[in-house]
Image (cartoon, rainbow, N blue to C red):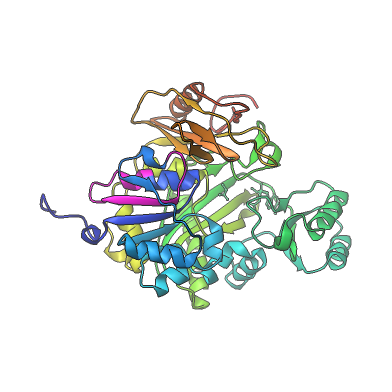
Amino acid sequence: MTKNQKPNGLSELKRILIIGSGGRENSIAWALSRNQYIEQIYVCPGNGGTANFEKCICLKPNKEGQETIIFECQRLQINLVIIGPEVPLAEGLANKLRQAGLLVFGPCKEGAQLEASKDWAKTLMLENNIPTANYWSSHSKEEALEILHKVNQPLVIKADGLASGKGVIVCETIEQSKEAIQEVFSGRFGSAGNKVILEEKIEGPEVSLFALCDGEKLIVLPPAQDHKRLLDGDKGPNTGGMGAYAPAPLVNQQDLKDLTELILIPTLKGLKRKKIKYIGVIYAGLMLTSSGPKVIEFNCRFGDPECQALMPLMGEEFASVLFACARGELEKAPTLTFKNQCSVCVVAASKGYPDSPKEGDQISLKLESNPSLQVFHAGTTIDEFHNIITSGGRVLSVVAQGESFDKAFDLAYASLKKIKFDGMHFRRDIGYQIRNIST
Ligand code: AMP
Ligand code: GLY
C-alpha cells in the first residue's frame, strides 16, 4: 500500500452508527475510534462513557423506532450500521435498514432466531449434525411435567425466547426442575416462556466462540471465557456476565480450527440452506464435555462482557472486516490480525444487580491513562453537572492487557480500587481457571 492509500474499503467508510447502550457497544466504539480513516462514530443511545473516545458521540433522537433510525442514518450519511444487542436484531431492525439501502453488520430477523428461539436453534443444530445437549420442547406446563416424569432425571429448564440472559434454570434435582417448569409457565419470563426447552444437563468447562460472517464466509475471533454467575466461586444467580478473558487457553489453535469445522461452518451453512444470508456475529456458547464439545446456546451478536475483552486484541483491520461483512465481501477484506496479548475484563455492578439494580449514584473514577487499560461504560449517564452517575445493573467494566494473564488481572484489579460508587461490587476471582487463586 502506498503512503496515502486507504486500506481496502475504507475510502467509503467514514461515518458509523452503533446501536446499543452497553459495555459491548462502548468497546466496539473505542476499537473503531482508533482507526484513523473513520471520521465519526455515533452510538444510539450510547451511555455516559461514549463521548470519552475521540470521534464518538451519543445520538439521542427525539422519537424511538426503526423509521427514526433510518431517518437519522440518511441525515448523518452513515456508511455502516452495527447493531449490538439481540432485541433490535430479533425485531428486524437490520431488515428495515437494508431495505432502506443501508449497509448493516448484524443479522436479519430470520437469522436472529438463532438466539430469539432456542427451539429454532436446536432444530437447526439437529438438521446440521451440530453437537448439542439432548432436549425436549413443550408449549404447556402439563406436557413439560409429563416429559420430566418420563425422563426421570433433573433437566435444565430454558425459556424459548429472549430473557436478557436470565431465562435458563439449571436444576440439581427433579423437584427443582418441576418448580422451574411451573415458574416459567407462570410468566416469570413473560412471553419468552410461552414455550420451554427441557435440556439434558451436561458438564464441562465453558467457552465462547465468535465468528464474523458475511453470509457466505466467516472469520473466527480468539475464544473467550465468560463468568455468568454473580458471585465468586461461580455462586449466586446467572447474570449477563461478570467478567471475561481472551484468548481462553482452554482452546488452542488446532481446537479452534476443529470447532470451526464442527460447529461454526455447519451453522452458517445451515442458515444458508434456510435461505438466510447471515451477516453479523455467530456466538456459540460451548461446553467441553467428556464426550466432546456441545453447544449450549447460540447468540446473534457479540457477547457482553466477552466483547470488551476482545476489542483491545483486534488489529486495525477490524473496521474493514466489519464493513466487508456488511457488503457480503469478506474475501476482499484484509486479513484480520490479533494482538499477541492476554486481555481481561472485570465488570463492576451496582447494588441489587441482577434483580433490582440501584441507580443514581455518583461514580468516582481516578485512573491514570495507560495504553493497556480501558474503562468501558455500560449503565452510566452524565448529569447536568457533568458527574457520571450509575443508571443500570452492570455499570462499567475495567479491561486490561498484559503479556500474561496474571499481569493483566493485576492491572485490572489494581485499577478497580480507584473506582468507587455506592454499592459497587465485582467478582474477585475472574479468570480463576487460569490464575493461581483459591475460590
Ligand atoms: P445460557 O444462557 O443458555 O448460556 O445458559 C446459562 C448458563 O446455564 C450456561 O452458561 C451454563 O453454565 C448453564 N447451562 C445451560 N445449558 C446447560 C446444560 N444443558 N447443562 C448444564 N448447564 C447448562
Ligand atoms: N456474556 C453472555 C452473553 O452476552 O450472552
The residue at the point 38 percent across, 61 percent down is 72
Q: Give the percent coordinates (x, y) of residue 8.
A: 22, 59
Q: Which residue does the image show at 58% across and 41% down from the upper left?
A: 392
Residue 38 highlighted magenta (yes or no): yes
Q: Quadrant of the C terminus?
A: top right
Residue 325 position within the rendered picture, expressed as x and y whole percent measured from the top left: 36, 63
357 over 71 or under it: above or below: above
Quadrant for residue 367, please give it: top left
Q: Looking at the picture, how far across and down is residue 54, in whole percent? A: 31, 41
**383 drawn magenta:** no
- Indicate left or right for 27 with 291 as reference: left
Q: Is residue 116 visible?
A: yes
Which image quadrant for residue 123? bottom right
**Of 309 and 86, the residue lying toward us:** 86
372 or 124, which is in the foreground?
Answer: 372
Horizontal side of residue 327 vs 66, given as left or right: left
Closer to the camera, 86 or 58? Answer: 58
- The quadrant where residue 432 appears: top right
Q: Quadrant of the N terminus?
A: bottom left
Count of numbered badges drawn on the protein: 0
Q: Position of residue 49 (x, y in %)?
A: 43, 39
Q: Report whether residue 279 is seen.
A: no
| Residue extent of the magenta highlight | 30-49
In the picture, measured across the screen, residue 1 lies left or right of residue 41, that is left
Instruction: Please say if 111 is above or below 256.
Output: below
